[in-house]
């Protein structure tokens, strides 16, 4: 039984808004996010009811992806959860329109004396992390990591800080990106390969309060790493031995991120033919009842529970064997080419001219439950301009040139087509993002790249390539400009 606000004791007699709070809690379970917000604006009593944290936690748990993909929201305040659910509802409404007009655009130069290696949003879209190599700043060409908060309005100053690392980290890949720990801190897994063939990993802590960048933990391994994954407080990487045994090292960070609270090596049971030369990927699923590791290849998907304890008689030469509690094999020979994987989300693959979203349902009552959703696109050549150039957790983006009134293509004009990740069995609709009203000419820009998308803020990052003094080849210098597109 929930406690009635003190200001409302003894006044529940006539008006429907004066029902006991339990009745309204049941009613609000059947309302959408925007309906609950409207309900809270009708009177003071209902406003107090709609500010209860329990209300928004229930809505969060019922959301189709927020609770699974962004588990840090569970520990947020009611106002933060409400704001995030409202943003998600507004994005869903915008994406069903035939044409999308962004709310605002911000453009700023990304000027640094070095080689670009990667640019990613921190969850929330307010901060960006940049990786570049510079011989002038660091003679050994080690990496420079820059935390950037661009100025999005006149009253908000820009902020940035740069950290020079002693290790030359590899460029960011699609699977790389900042993520939230269980305590809500922003972390990122860095990796590189040393001259002796070993692999080096680093845990980067991105502190947006100071702001500061640090790498509190660096660890190495001499095995041939097939792939790796990081989410929450967990880091995992795997390798295959010469006798075709598949091993995983599963590590859990401590509170300061400078050592491991748990570090175990296990062997996973794979069917024959699925642990050889196939490309393998891993994913961590932490939102379920038990944390688990997902193994993904073109011929097998399998999930394994992460052991909570290791037996006392554990032998390092014969590690614990994990058997899959969920597995899926393709109806044909293969799932197709793996395009991308999202933590707690879908595995995206390309098969027979279709983009397919394979969603394992690891907590379902029936065994090996899953859902496959498809998106058809034309023409059937993925190398054409129709091929999506950016996958977000819930959105797909295409980038192409826009012919002007004379019928020619201006290099600085562009069109962006987008669609939501299909929720039903099939989807083909696209929406056009109309940037022409806010477009500013930049004739010297030769290339535009859809860099990153942040679902929490509804913000798209576009990176532009320009050349200064293009008429003088000896003085030519690459200049980057970043455009942030806000949809809500």
Image (cartoon, rainbow, N blue to C red):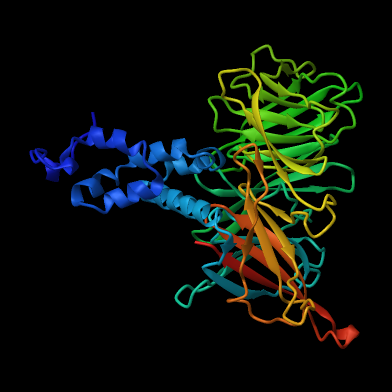
Tell me where residue 19 appears, x and y as whole percent. 18, 37
Quarter holding the N terminus is top left
Residue 164 seen in render: no
The vertical placement of 327 against 229, above or below, is above
The vertical placement of 379 against 137, above or below, is above
Tell me where residue 83 appears, x and y as whole percent. 41, 53
The vertical placement of 50 against 317, above or below, is below
Tell me where residue 157 appears, x and y as whole percent. 50, 74
In the image, is 367 to the left or to the right of 472?
left
Q: Quadrant of residue 244?
A: top right
In the image, is 381 to the left or to the right of 116?
right
Which sits in the foreground, 328 or 466? 328
Tell me where residue 62 appears, x and y as whole percent. 45, 36
Which sits in the foreground, 58 or 188? 58
Q: Quadrant of residue 465?
A: bottom right
Residue appearing at x 78%, y 27% in the figure = 330
Which sits in the foreground, 338 or 331? 331
């Amino acid at each position: 039984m929930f406690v009635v606000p003190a200001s409302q004791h003894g006044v529940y007699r006539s008006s429907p808004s004066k029902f006991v709070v339990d009745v309204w809690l049941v009613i609000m379970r059947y309302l959408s996010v925007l309906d609950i917000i409207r309900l809270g604006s009708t009177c003071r009593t209902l406003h107090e009811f709609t500010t209860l944290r329990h209300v928004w936690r229930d809505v969060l748990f019922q959301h189709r992806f927020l609770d699974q993909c962004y588990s840090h929201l569970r520990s947020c305040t009611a106002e933060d959860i409400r704001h995030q659910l409202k943003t998600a509802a507004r994005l869903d409404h915008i994406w069903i329109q035939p044409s999308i007009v962004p709310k605002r655009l911000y453009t700023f130069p990304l000027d640094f004396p070095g080689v670009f290696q990667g640019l990613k949003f921190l969850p929330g879209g307010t901060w960006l992390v940049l990786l570049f190599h510079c011989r002038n700043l660091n003679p050994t060409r080690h990496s420079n990591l820059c935390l950037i908060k661009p100025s999005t309005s006149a009253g908000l100053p820009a902020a940035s800080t740069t950290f020079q690392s002693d290790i030359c980290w590899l460029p960011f890949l699609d699977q790389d990106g900042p993520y939230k720990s269980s305590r809500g801190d922003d972390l990122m897994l860095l990796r590189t390969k040393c001259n002796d063939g070993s692999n080096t990993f680093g845990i980067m802590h991105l502190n947006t309060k100071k702001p500061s960048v640090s790498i509190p933990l660096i660890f190495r391994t001499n095995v041939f790493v097939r792939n790796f994954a990081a989410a929450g407080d967990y880091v995992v990487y795997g390798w295959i031995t010469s006798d075709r045994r598949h091993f995983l090292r599963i590590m859990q960070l401590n509170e300061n991120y400078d050592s491991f609270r748990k570090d175990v090596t296990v062997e996973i049971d794979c069917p024959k033919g699925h642990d050889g030369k196939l490309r393998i990927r891993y994913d961590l699923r932490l939102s379920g009842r038990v944390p688990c590791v997902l193994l993904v290849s073109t011929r097998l998907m399998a999930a394994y529970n992460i052991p909570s304890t290791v037996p006392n008689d554990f032998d390092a030469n014969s590690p614990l064997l994990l058997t899959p509690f969920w597995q899926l094999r393709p109806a044909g020979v293969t799932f197709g080419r793996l395009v991308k994987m999202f933590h707690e989300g879908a595995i995206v693959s390309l098969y027979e001219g279709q983009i397919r979203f394979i969603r394992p349902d690891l907590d379902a009552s029936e065994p090996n439950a899953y859902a496959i959703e498809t998106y058809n696109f034309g023409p059937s050549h993925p190398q054409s301009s129709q091929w999506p150039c950016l996958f977000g957790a819930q959105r797909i983006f295409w980038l192409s040139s826009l012919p002007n009134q004379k019928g020619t293509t201006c290099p600085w004009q562009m069109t962006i087509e987008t669609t939501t990740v299909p929720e039903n069995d099939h989807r083909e609709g696209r929406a056009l993002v109309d940037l022409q009203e806010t477009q500013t000419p930049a004739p010297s820009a030769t290339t535009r790249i859809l860099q990153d998308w942040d679902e929490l803020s509804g913000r798209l990052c576009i990176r532009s390539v320009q050349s200064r003094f293009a008429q003088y080849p000896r003085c030519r210098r690459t200049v980057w400009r970043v455009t942030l597109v806000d949809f809500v």
